[in-house]
Image (cartoon, rainbow, N blue to C red):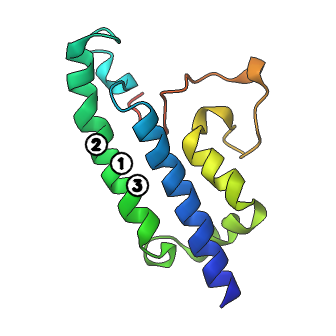
Amino acid sequence: MFSFFEEYVKHSALNFGQAAQGFRFLLTHPDADSLARPGTVRHAVAALPIRAKRIANDLFFAVIPPHWHHTDQELKSLHGYSVKQWFDAGYGPYRFAETGEYLPAHEITHEPRWDPRCKE
């Protein structure tokens, strides 16, 4: 039972972190950069629906049990990191390598508005 609770809390932390990042950059998004120059009203109008959909998605997945949509192996990976680390991974995914390791500032390749769901 403790394992279920731990997985639920850590998964929620990740998704709440993603939602917090969405609120932080509500009116700007890399996927809107091709539509308008960042900092313009047109860019904000283009970015808002992208962020709003992702925030709604992140909040939905923060509430439902991760066991409904993740494999046992994915759930086991939650145990290696703290709740704070999972929140940070959602809030600032640009700060982490694909392996999950924290990147030093000089190795960060993504900008702060980026999230893994951005178009390439």
How far apart are the alpha carbons under marks 1 and 2? 5 Å
The correct choice, above or below, for 19 with respect to 11 in the image is above
CB-based contact (under 8 Å), mark 3 and mark 1: yes
Residue 41 image point, x, y percent: 22, 14
CB-based contact (under 8 Å), mark 1 and mark 2: yes
- Depth check, front residue: 37 or 71: 37
Q: Which residue reaches farthest bottom?
A: 1
Residue 117 in sight in this render: no
45 left or right of 120?
left
Q: Quadrant of the N terminus?
A: bottom right
Residue underneath mark 1: 55
Residue at (34%, 46%) from the top-left corner?
Answer: 54
- Any mark on residue 58, and which? 3
Residue at (23%, 36%) from the top-left corner?
Answer: 49
Secondary structure under tag 2 reads helix
39 left or right of 48?
right
Going by the numbered disc 2, the residue's amino acid type is Ala
- Any mark on residue 52, and which? 2
